[in-house]
Image (tube, grey):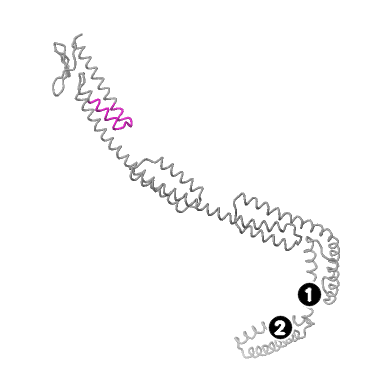
Amino acid sequence: MSTDPWGRVDDDGTVYVRTAEGERAVGSWQAGEPEEALAYFHRKYDELAGQVQLLEQRLKGTDLAPAQAEASIVKLREAVADAHAIGDLAALTARLDGLSELVAHRREEVKAAREHARVEAKAVKERIVAEAERIAEETTHWKSGGERLRQLVEEWKAADRIDRATEAGLWKRLSAARTAFAKRRKTYFAGLDEQREGVRAEKERIVDEAEALAKSTDWGPTASVYRELMQRWKAAGRASRDAEDELWARFKAAQDVFFQARSTVFAERDASLAANAEAKEVLLVEAEKILPVTDARAARGSLRVLLERWEAVGPVPREQRDRLEGGLRKIDEAVRKAEDAEWKRSNPEARARAQSTVDQLRTSIEQLEKRLAKAEAAGRAKDVKEAEEALTARRSWLEEAERTLAEFS
């Protein structure tokens, strides 16, 4: 008689497993002792228990998908229900029930995670669409704007998917933004091409004028015209790169022809004027001897003679002209100042005014001195103080007035 709590072998070799519902035949054993049969079917049970344990480990230690885990539980549950094994099958069923609960919890977690991911993905895609629409409406940085729109599409593809209706609506807005940007860019460059064509036509006219003047020998007026043409060139804007380069080469070539010819002529002329510069150097040294001016009339006479000789010499090279003319101008200014001072000294009206001022101040001082004496005699301190202050001021004014009068002597 077997004492195994989970099964037995009948006299005819039938092997039974004990369950809560009663015994169930699981096999037949004819080739040996009942203990061997029980051991064999226990091993079958251990195999099932090992599969349950392995599934438990996979569920608790890995990210096994709930659907895959549930399929494995169903398969093992069927294997336990029909198991040809001896052991605590109810315990295996209970463990599988626990795994089913774990899978259900896992499924809820996955569902919540997916919902959270969808919410985040929606926020990401709404942000992508909003930025794309802003670029489409506002930006005029066409290269960087186009590159950013391409990046936004890649970010969209990398983001998780959301519900179909929202996904389709947002994608429609993103596509519309890209289309709007492309249309704005196309319109801008079409206008830019038209503008550049207008610039090209204006610069073509400028170049034609420049080339027509290249052989001119009217040096001063033509140089002025070239400066005006350069100002018009800068104000016109830019044509396309190829047209700009070609037109600028022609414009510069025309200028170079004119200015090189002018430089050659000026250089030859300056060489011929070197002797004039040497002669004026000598005249300038002679003129400097007039200084300092002691007799304005004599100085003016000497300078007048020097000026006549200066004009008779003729022009000098440009690089020496300012220095020589400036030196002579300083001498002329010194003579003029001496003349002004002489005229001031000899002006009878000015001398009379200076004498009158001196006389008035002297009279005023005599009166103030009398007032001061009376105030001191009467002991009026306030009147004394006022008289003294008035006298101090008028004596100072008198000194200045007398110096001015002395200049007319």
What residue is rendered at 60% in x and 86% in y?
382
Residue at which label 1 appears: 336
Residue 197 x, y percent position in the rendering: 58, 54
Q: Regarding mark 1 in the picture, which secondary structure is present there?
A: helix
The answer to whether residue 382 is left or right of residue 133 is right
Query: Vertically, is 9 above or below 118?
Result: above
Query: Vertically, is 38 above or below 181?
Result: above
The label shown at residue 398 is: 2
Q: Regarding mark 2 in the picture, which secondary structure is present there?
A: helix
Kindly identify the amino acid type of the residue bearing the numbered disc 1: Arg
**Does any portion of residue 149 appear in the rendered image?**
yes
Which image quarter holds the N terminus?
top left
Residue numbers of the magenta segment = 55-77
Kindly identify the amino acid type of the residue bearing the numbered disc 2: Leu
Prevailing SS of the magenta stretch: helix
Residue 332 belongs to magenta span:
no
